[in-house]
Amino acid sequence: MIQLVAGTAENCRIAAPLLDKGLVRQKVEDKYPLEWCLAEIQSNRAQLWMAWEHGKLTGAVMTIINTYPSGLKYLDIFLLGGWKFHKWAMDGYNAIKEFALSQGCVTLAAGGRSGWSKVVKKYEPEARTDSLIAINLR
């Protein structure tokens, strides 16, 4: 089961290893330090979602509500880390989608490795899975 949790120091401490795993896996830990992510969650500028199975944390997701220049809001699934994704992905997607709608968001957005396009298509066959191109200059 996955749920939105309070951005407390304790929840951040518990989720930190999985969030860090996601940063390292995406190779963005130099751009988005774990400490920044945790500060965003604790200040309520970002949301923390935690997935549990048999009392063990199996996933942590960080989302951020942003606004397009037009004024429309979208929810960015900013960071995800964990394992046994297949066991909590659908519940997580539905919970995050419901939250986004309740906040007035018109879009869910996420960036990630190319393999995520296949995963997204399982849940939303009509989803656009355009690529984000990032070229490291140093």
Image (cartoon, rainbow, N blue to C red):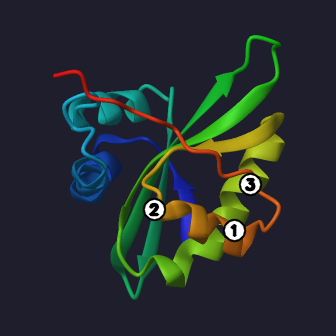
- 138 vs 9, nearest the viewer: 138
Would residue 1 be seen by someone viewing this image from the given angle?
A: no
**Mark 1 — residue?**
121
Q: Nearer the viewer, mark 2 or mark 1?
A: 1
Q: Residues within 10 Å of mark 3 (few under 14, many from 20)?
A: some
Q: Amino acid at mark 2?
A: Met
Would residue 36 be seen by someone viewing this image from the given angle?
A: yes
**Real-space CA distance between mark 3 and mark 2, rounded to the nearest whole angstrom:** 15 Å
Q: Between disc 3 and disc 2, whose residue precedes? A: 2
Residue 90: x percent and y percent?
A: 65, 74
**Mark 3 — residue?**
97
- 66 vs 14, nearest the viewer: 66
At 51% from the left edge and 44% from the top edge, which residue is drawn?
A: 111
For this view, does 119 lie left or right of residue 24?
right
Q: Looking at the rendering, which quadrant does residue 92 occupy? A: bottom right
Judged from this view, the residue extending furthest toward the bottom is: 54
Disc 3 secondary structure class: helix
Disc 1 secondary structure class: helix
For this view, does 10 lie left or right of residue 132?
left
Residue 128: x percent and y percent?
A: 74, 51
**Mark 2 — residue?**
50
Q: Between disc 3 and disc 1, whose residue precedes? A: 3
**Real-space CA distance between mark 2 and mark 1, rounded to the nearest whole angstrom:** 23 Å
Is 9 above or below relative to 58? above
At 51% from the left edge and 26% from the top edge, which residue is drawn?
A: 45
Is 123 above or below relative to 107? below
At 64% from the left edge and 64% from the top edge, which residue is drawn?
A: 120
Residue 53: x percent and y percent?
A: 43, 83
At 43% from the left edge and 41% from the top edge, which residue is drawn?
A: 7
Q: Residues within 10 Å of mark 1 (few under 14, many from 20)?
A: few
